[in-house]
Protein backbone atom coordinates (compact mmCIF):
# COMPACT_ATOMS: atom_id res chain seq x y z
CA UNK A 1 0.00 0.00 0.00
CA UNK A 2 1.05 3.58 -0.52
CA UNK A 3 0.65 6.74 1.54
CA UNK A 4 1.23 10.16 0.02
CA UNK A 5 1.94 12.83 2.65
CA UNK A 6 1.34 16.49 1.87
CA UNK A 7 3.35 18.47 4.41
CA UNK A 8 5.28 21.64 5.07
CA UNK A 9 7.87 19.67 7.03
CA UNK A 10 8.94 16.53 5.12
CA UNK A 11 12.14 16.34 7.16
CA UNK A 12 10.11 15.21 10.18
CA UNK A 13 9.28 11.89 8.55
CA UNK A 14 12.59 10.28 7.56
CA UNK A 15 13.86 9.56 11.12
CA UNK A 16 10.62 7.83 12.05
CA UNK A 17 10.49 5.68 8.92
CA UNK A 18 13.96 4.21 9.44
CA UNK A 19 13.91 3.37 13.15
CA UNK A 20 12.35 0.67 15.29
CA UNK A 21 10.62 -2.53 14.35
CA UNK A 22 8.16 -0.87 11.95
CA UNK A 23 11.05 0.08 9.65
CA UNK A 24 10.64 -3.43 8.20
CA UNK A 25 7.35 -2.41 6.63
CA UNK A 26 8.84 0.74 5.08
CA UNK A 27 12.15 -0.84 3.99
CA UNK A 28 10.37 -3.76 2.32
CA UNK A 29 7.92 -1.50 0.51
CA UNK A 30 4.91 -3.07 2.20
CA UNK A 31 4.10 0.48 3.22
CA UNK A 32 5.35 2.93 0.59
CA UNK A 33 5.51 6.53 1.83
CA UNK A 34 5.89 9.42 -0.62
CA UNK A 35 6.40 12.96 0.67
CA UNK A 36 5.01 16.02 -1.11
CA UNK A 37 6.55 19.27 0.25
CA UNK A 38 3.74 21.79 -0.01
CA UNK A 39 5.95 24.81 -0.72
CA UNK A 40 7.04 23.11 -3.95
CA UNK A 41 3.52 23.79 -5.21
CA UNK A 42 3.41 27.51 -4.39
CA UNK A 43 3.70 29.70 -7.47
CA UNK A 44 4.78 33.07 -6.10
CA UNK A 45 8.35 34.16 -5.36
CA UNK A 46 7.80 33.83 -1.61
CA UNK A 47 6.45 30.26 -1.89
CA UNK A 48 3.42 31.38 0.05
CA UNK A 49 1.01 28.66 1.17
CA UNK A 50 -1.05 30.64 3.70
CA UNK A 51 -2.78 33.98 4.15
CA UNK A 52 -4.89 35.94 6.63
CA UNK A 53 -8.40 34.63 7.34
CA UNK A 54 -11.44 36.44 5.98
CA UNK A 55 -13.48 37.87 8.81
CA UNK A 56 -10.40 38.58 10.88
CA UNK A 57 -9.03 36.65 13.81
CA UNK A 58 -5.68 35.19 14.84
CA UNK A 59 -3.46 32.92 12.82
CA UNK A 60 -3.17 32.14 9.13
CA UNK A 61 -5.15 29.83 6.87
CA UNK A 62 -3.61 27.38 4.39
CA UNK A 63 -4.50 28.31 0.80
CA UNK A 64 -6.53 26.14 -1.54
CA UNK A 65 -4.45 26.41 -4.71
CA UNK A 66 -1.11 24.97 -3.46
CA UNK A 67 -2.97 22.14 -1.75
CA UNK A 68 -4.91 21.32 -4.91
CA UNK A 69 -1.73 21.27 -7.00
CA UNK A 70 -0.02 18.98 -4.50
CA UNK A 71 -3.00 16.65 -4.35
CA UNK A 72 -3.27 16.54 -8.12
CA UNK A 73 0.43 15.68 -8.44
CA UNK A 74 0.12 12.88 -5.91
CA UNK A 75 -2.92 11.46 -7.68
CA UNK A 76 -1.18 11.52 -11.08
CA UNK A 77 1.88 9.83 -9.58
CA UNK A 78 -0.36 7.13 -8.12
CA UNK A 79 -1.83 6.45 -11.54
CA UNK A 80 -5.18 7.92 -10.65
CA UNK A 81 -6.31 5.14 -8.32
CA UNK A 82 -8.91 6.52 -5.89
CA UNK A 83 -7.86 6.47 -2.24
CA UNK A 84 -9.08 8.33 0.84
CA UNK A 85 -7.82 11.84 1.49
CA UNK A 86 -7.24 12.09 5.24
CA UNK A 87 -7.13 15.41 7.08
CA UNK A 88 -5.87 15.48 10.68
CA UNK A 89 -7.84 17.88 12.85
CA UNK A 90 -9.13 18.07 16.45
CA UNK A 91 -12.65 18.17 14.96
CA UNK A 92 -12.20 14.78 13.27
CA UNK A 93 -13.31 11.31 14.27
CA UNK A 94 -11.14 9.50 16.84
CA UNK A 95 -8.20 7.60 15.32
CA UNK A 96 -9.28 4.18 16.58
CA UNK A 97 -7.76 0.75 16.02
CA UNK A 98 -10.78 -0.18 13.89
CA UNK A 99 -10.17 2.76 11.56
CA UNK A 100 -6.46 1.95 11.40
CA UNK A 101 -7.25 -1.66 10.48
CA UNK A 102 -9.62 -0.49 7.74
CA UNK A 103 -6.88 1.70 6.24
CA UNK A 104 -4.34 -1.12 6.59
CA UNK A 105 -6.62 -3.36 4.55
CA UNK A 106 -6.82 -0.89 1.67
CA UNK A 107 -4.50 0.62 -0.91
CA UNK A 108 -3.37 3.51 1.28
CA UNK A 109 -4.36 7.16 1.40
CA UNK A 110 -3.28 10.74 0.88
CA UNK A 111 -2.42 12.23 4.28
CA UNK A 112 -2.96 15.96 4.58
CA UNK A 113 -0.90 17.62 7.30
CA UNK A 114 -2.43 20.98 8.10
CA UNK A 115 -0.67 23.82 9.92
CA UNK A 116 -1.44 27.30 11.24
CA UNK A 117 -5.06 28.08 12.10
CA UNK A 118 -6.32 25.49 9.65
CA UNK A 119 -7.09 24.74 6.01
CA UNK A 120 -9.47 26.70 3.79
CA UNK A 121 -12.79 24.88 4.22
CA UNK A 122 -13.39 24.90 0.47
CA UNK A 123 -10.50 22.49 -0.04
CA UNK A 124 -11.79 20.24 2.73
CA UNK A 125 -15.32 20.24 1.29
CA UNK A 126 -14.09 19.39 -2.21
CA UNK A 127 -11.41 16.82 -1.54
CA UNK A 128 -11.22 15.43 2.00
CA UNK A 129 -12.97 12.09 2.55
CA UNK A 130 -11.93 11.39 6.16
CA UNK A 131 -11.05 13.63 9.10
CA UNK A 132 -9.22 12.05 12.04
CA UNK A 133 -8.23 13.28 15.48
CA UNK A 134 -5.43 11.93 17.66
CA UNK A 135 -7.23 13.06 20.81
CA UNK A 136 -8.96 15.89 22.60
CA UNK A 137 -6.03 18.29 22.40
CA UNK A 138 -4.47 20.60 19.83
CA UNK A 139 -1.13 20.05 18.09
CA UNK A 140 0.90 22.45 15.93
CA UNK A 141 0.23 20.43 12.80
CA UNK A 142 -0.82 17.16 11.24
CA UNK A 143 2.63 15.59 11.00
CA UNK A 144 2.55 13.83 14.38
CA UNK A 145 -0.91 12.30 13.77
CA UNK A 146 0.26 11.23 10.30
CA UNK A 147 3.32 9.53 11.81
CA UNK A 148 1.10 7.84 14.39
CA UNK A 149 -1.14 6.52 11.63
CA UNK A 150 1.80 5.27 9.56
CA UNK A 151 3.30 3.49 12.58
CA UNK A 152 -0.02 1.89 13.48
CA UNK A 153 -0.58 0.70 9.91
CA UNK A 154 2.99 -0.54 9.50
CA UNK A 155 2.89 -2.80 12.57
CA UNK A 156 -0.14 -4.62 11.14
CA UNK A 157 1.75 -5.72 8.02
CA UNK A 158 2.71 -9.41 7.73
CA UNK A 159 6.18 -10.15 9.08
CA UNK A 160 6.64 -6.85 10.91
CA UNK A 161 5.75 -8.15 14.36
CA UNK A 162 6.08 -11.60 15.82
CA UNK A 163 2.66 -13.05 15.11
CA UNK A 164 0.22 -12.82 16.74
CA UNK A 165 1.52 -9.85 18.74
CA UNK A 166 -0.79 -7.22 17.29
CA UNK A 167 -3.80 -9.48 17.89
CA UNK A 168 -3.18 -9.09 21.63
CA UNK A 169 -2.81 -5.31 21.60
CA UNK A 170 -5.12 -2.92 23.36
CA UNK A 171 -8.31 -2.34 21.34
CA UNK A 172 -7.76 -5.32 19.03
CA UNK A 173 -10.66 -7.13 20.70
CA UNK A 174 -12.30 -3.94 21.93
CA UNK A 175 -10.66 -3.99 25.38
CA UNK A 176 -7.45 -2.64 26.89
CA UNK A 177 -4.46 -4.97 27.05
CA UNK A 178 -3.53 -6.90 30.19
CA UNK A 179 -0.32 -6.30 32.22
CA UNK A 180 2.87 -8.05 31.11
CA UNK A 181 5.85 -9.35 33.15
CA UNK A 182 9.37 -10.59 32.41
CA UNK A 183 12.57 -11.44 34.32
CA UNK A 184 13.53 -11.35 37.12
CA UNK A 185 10.91 -13.60 38.66
CA UNK A 186 11.17 -11.57 41.90
CA UNK A 187 12.16 -7.91 41.69
CA UNK A 188 13.90 -6.68 44.83
CA UNK A 189 12.92 -3.11 45.74
CA UNK A 190 13.31 -0.81 48.73
CA UNK A 191 9.67 -1.52 49.55
CA UNK A 192 10.16 -5.28 49.47
CA UNK A 193 10.12 -8.06 46.87
CA UNK A 194 7.76 -7.81 43.92
CA UNK A 195 7.10 -11.27 42.43
CA UNK A 196 5.56 -12.07 39.07
CA UNK A 197 1.94 -13.23 39.55
CA UNK A 198 2.07 -16.93 40.39
CA UNK A 199 -0.42 -17.94 37.70
CA UNK A 200 2.01 -16.83 34.97
CA UNK A 201 4.58 -19.32 36.31
CA UNK A 202 2.10 -22.17 36.65
CA UNK A 203 2.29 -23.57 33.13
CA UNK A 204 -1.51 -23.92 33.08
CA UNK A 205 -2.34 -22.21 29.80
CA UNK A 206 -6.08 -22.11 30.33
CA UNK A 207 -5.63 -20.44 33.71
CA UNK A 208 -3.14 -17.97 32.26
CA UNK A 209 -5.54 -17.13 29.45
CA UNK A 210 -8.36 -16.56 31.92
CA UNK A 211 -6.14 -14.45 34.22
CA UNK A 212 -5.17 -12.23 31.29
CA UNK A 213 -8.79 -11.89 30.22
CA UNK A 214 -9.84 -10.88 33.73
CA UNK A 215 -7.06 -8.32 33.96
CA UNK A 216 -8.22 -6.90 30.62
CA UNK A 217 -11.77 -6.65 31.89
CA UNK A 218 -10.70 -5.15 35.21
CA UNK A 219 -8.44 -2.50 33.65
CA UNK A 220 -10.95 -1.59 30.96
CA UNK A 221 -13.83 -1.33 33.43
CA UNK A 222 -11.75 0.98 35.62
CA UNK A 223 -10.23 3.21 32.94
CA UNK A 224 -12.51 2.97 29.90
CA UNK A 225 -16.02 1.82 30.88
CA UNK A 226 -17.21 3.05 27.49
CA UNK A 227 -15.25 0.21 25.90
CA UNK A 228 -17.01 -2.31 28.16
CA UNK A 229 -20.36 -0.92 27.03
CA UNK A 230 -19.29 -1.16 23.38
CA UNK A 231 -18.02 -4.74 23.79
CA UNK A 232 -21.28 -5.69 25.49
CA UNK A 233 -23.35 -4.11 22.72
CA UNK A 234 -21.28 -5.96 20.10
CA UNK A 235 -21.80 -9.29 21.88
CA UNK A 236 -18.07 -9.77 22.62
CA UNK A 237 -18.53 -10.47 26.35
CA UNK A 238 -19.23 -14.02 27.54
CA UNK A 239 -21.38 -14.97 30.51
CA UNK A 240 -18.16 -15.62 32.41
CA UNK A 241 -16.91 -12.15 31.51
CA UNK A 242 -20.14 -10.62 32.77
CA UNK A 243 -19.95 -12.59 36.01
CA UNK A 244 -16.41 -11.34 36.59
CA UNK A 245 -17.43 -7.74 35.92
CA UNK A 246 -20.25 -8.07 38.44
CA UNK A 247 -17.75 -9.33 41.00
CA UNK A 248 -15.81 -6.06 40.65
CA UNK A 249 -18.75 -3.96 41.73
CA UNK A 250 -18.63 -2.78 45.37
Image: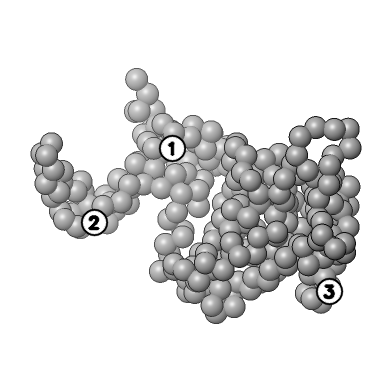
Secondary element at image label 3: helix
Between 16 and 81, the residue placed more toward the observer is 16
Helix, strand or loop at disc 1?
Answer: helix
Left or right placement of residue 92 versus residue 127 in this view: left
Residue where numbered disc 1 is placed:
220
Which residue corresponds to mark 2?
Answer: 182
Task: Point out the tag, 1 or 2, that comes first from the N-terminus.
Answer: 2
How much space separates mark 1 and mark 3, taking CA atoms? 45 Å
Residue at 69 percent across and 44 percent down: it is: 89
Circle 3/circle 2 CB separation < 8 Å: no
Disc 1 residue crowd, few under 14, some 14–19, many 20+, Cα 10 Å: many
Indicate the quadrant where residue 136 lies: top right
Q: Nearer the viewer, residue 52 or 80?
A: 52
**Side (left or right) of 98 relative to 240:** right
SS for callout 2: loop
Q: Position of residue 183 (x, y in %)?
A: 19, 57
Residue 9 is labelled as none
For label 3, the crowd category at 10 Å Cα-Cα, with few meaning under 14, some 14 to 19 and many 20 or more, is few
- Disc with the residue nearer the chain's start (3 vs 2): 3
**Residue tagged by mark 3?**
76
Residue occupying the point 84% across, 39% down? 53
| Mark 1 / mark 3, whichever is N-terminal | 3
**Screen quadrant of the N terminus:** bottom right
At horizontal 82% and vertical 56% (from top left) the residue drawn is 48
Discs 3/2, front: 3
C-alpha distance separating marks 3 and 2 = 50 Å
Q: Nearer the viewer, residue 190 or 229?
A: 190
Amino acid sequence: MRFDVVTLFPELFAPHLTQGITRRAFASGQVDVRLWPLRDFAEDAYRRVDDRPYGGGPGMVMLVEPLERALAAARVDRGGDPVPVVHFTPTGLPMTQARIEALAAGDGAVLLCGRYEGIDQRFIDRHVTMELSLGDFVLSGGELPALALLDAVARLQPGVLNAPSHQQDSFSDGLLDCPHYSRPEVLQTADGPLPVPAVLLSGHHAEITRWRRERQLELTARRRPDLIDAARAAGRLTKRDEAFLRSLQP
